[in-house]
Image: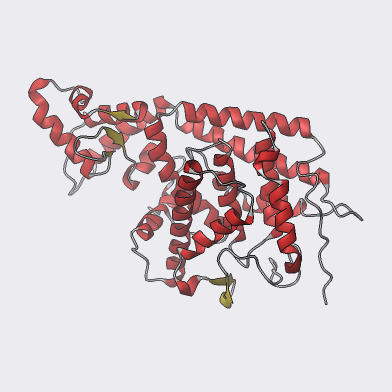
């Protein structure tokens, strides 16, 4: 019978090594993320952030070995699935991720949970995610396909789990999970931390949750969803303008290596190695800062203006059966991106038209609404910008590459 893994304590909750360096980096992330959100109009940030949920889903599932595309995810959101079973399963996973993140983000921003680290909430992430999938896919999955074991949505695992084909058990023994998860929830409750230490707690809790591997399956996805929700809960990246999962997936092996290195208990002690723990937290925060800076660069307003114009020009060159769009529409799109929302009565002047062109201006706005380029809650409500899939590679080519979109 294999020996049971050592069961380290969650204390100290934060690293006891290199804290000055870690706190400095956490401050950089907090300031950079806040600056990024402050530069974008709230309505634009909301529309873009919701579209970037597809990117979170794409990269989180890519880490798990399920490759799909933004267009496939979009189709799945409309219940339009591939006839290929593997491809359909990938679509289902990604659509479940988007719906779960969207739903729980709305919930925590409206009614913050008493303790986001409690099993009541973390288990809810797992439950909501798996309940988005068809019954036949609510079973633990392995390289050989689905097993006969239900994932038991929202419930702690009751058996050992392995990440290497059964050679070694991962995480603590299942019998210890109830008490360990309670200890985890108390150690990382946001109320125990202040200032930059709250973000450091997100980094630390991501590792500890991944080490616990509390569920029969889906632990990686749940862990990344949890960290994104935890950050939003403490006021970081509430608009979802940068993607932690994208940062992790850029070098999946390095992500896994950092997680596994920090798993090692200190020799002869029931505590995690503090040097590895510090290294992991620094890695986590470096990924955060890299992704914030990446998004800050590509959302530069001068670049967005040029890209919007590029979309309009390219659209007219290759429009095919698409109805031509007046090139003056670019002016309205740029204003919407910058300002967030515009009253309908102001659209004509932003299109560069005089009073005699009111009817033509309304036709242009109507066409843009039909194509999803602009949005409005009613025929009298203000206009806001839209981000349909067809514009993503033009507006944000560094994020939505052809391989990510599924246009290759």
Residue farthest along the top direction in this orientation? 354
Q: In which quarter of the image is residue 152?
A: bottom right
- How is the protein colored in the picture? secondary structure
Instruction: State left or right for residue 404 relative to residue 247.
Output: left
The quarter of the picture where the N terminus appears is: bottom right
State the image coordinates of residue 243 (x, y, percent, origin top left).
53, 43
Q: Position of residue 263 (x, y in %)?
A: 77, 54
- Image position of 324 (left or right of 65): left
Judged from this view, the residue extending furthest toward the bottom is 148
Who's the residue at 40% across and 56% down the image?
73
Instruction: Choose between 188 and 23: the one closer to the eye.
Output: 188
Asked whether the viewer can see residue 396, the reply is no
Residue 77 drawn above or below residue 283: below
Residue 54 in view (yes/no)? yes
Q: Which residue lies furthest to the right in this view?
A: 268
Position of residue 311 relative to residue 224, above or below, is above
Q: Where is residue 221 in the image (x, y as percent from the top left)?
A: 57, 56
Image point 61% across, 35% down: which residue?
A: 289
Left or right? Give the position of 152 relative to 168. left
* Residue at position x 36%, y 65% in the image: 81
* Of 267 and 378, the residue lying toward us: 378
Residue 8 x, y percent position in the rendering: 81, 55
Please state, as top left, top right, bottom left or bottom right, where the C terminus lies in the image.
Answer: bottom left
Q: Which one is in front, 351 or 180? A: 180
Q: Which of 110 and 392 is in front in this view?
A: 110
Instruction: Give the total of numbered labels.
Output: 0
- Please, is residue 374 above or below residue 206 in the view? above
């Amino acid at each position: 019978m294999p020996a049971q893994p050592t069961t380290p304590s969650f204390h100290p909750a934060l690293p006891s090594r290199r804290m000055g360096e870690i706190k400095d980096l956490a401050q950089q992330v907090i300031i950079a993320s806040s600056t990024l959100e402050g530069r974008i109009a709230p309505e634009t940030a909301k529309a873009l952030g919701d579209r970037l949920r597809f990117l979170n889903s794409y990269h989180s599932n890519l880490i798990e070995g399920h490759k799909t595309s933004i267009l496939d995810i979009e189709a799945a959101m409309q219940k339009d699935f591939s006839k290929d079973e593997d491809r359909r399963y990938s679509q289902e996973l990604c659509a479940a991720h988007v719906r779960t993140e969207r739903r729980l983000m709305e919930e925590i921003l409206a009614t913050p949970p008493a303790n986001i680290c409690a099993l009541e909430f973390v288990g809810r992430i797992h439950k909501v995610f798996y309940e988005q999938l068809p019954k036949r896919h609510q079973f633990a999955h392995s390289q050989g396909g689905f097993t006969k074991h239900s994932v038991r949505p929202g419930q702690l695992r009751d058996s050992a789990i392995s990440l290497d084909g059964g050679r070694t058990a991962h995480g603590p023994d299942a019998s210890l999970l109830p008490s360990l998860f309670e200890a985890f929830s108390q150690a990382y409750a946001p109320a125990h931390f202040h200032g930059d230490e709250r973000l450091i707690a997100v980094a630390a809790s991501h590792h500890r949750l991944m080490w616990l591997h509390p569920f029969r399956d889906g632990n990686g996805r749940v862990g990344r969803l949890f960290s994104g929700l935890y950050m939003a809960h403490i006021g970081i990246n509430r608009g979802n303008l940068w993607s932690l999962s994208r940062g992790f997936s850029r070098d999946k092996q390095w992500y896994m290596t950092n997680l596994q290195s920090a798993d090692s208990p200190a020799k002869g002690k029931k505590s995690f190695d503090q040097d590895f723990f510090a290294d992991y937290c620094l890695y986590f925060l470096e990924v955060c800062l890299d992704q914030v800076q990446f998004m800050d660069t590509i959302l530069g307003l001068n670049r967005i203006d040029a890209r919007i114009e590029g979309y309009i020009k390219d659209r007219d060159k290759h429009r095919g059966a698409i109805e031509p769009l007046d090139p003056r529409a670019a002016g309205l799109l740029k204003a919407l991106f910058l300002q967030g929302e515009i009253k309908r009565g102001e659209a004509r002047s932003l299109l560069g038209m005089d009073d005699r062109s009111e009817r033509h201006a309304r036709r242009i706005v109507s066409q843009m609404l039909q194509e999803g380029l602009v949005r409005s809650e009613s025929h009298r409500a203000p206009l806001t910008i839209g981000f349909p899939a067809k514009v993503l590679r033009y507006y944000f080519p560094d994020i939505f590459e052809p391989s990510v979109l599924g246009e290759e």
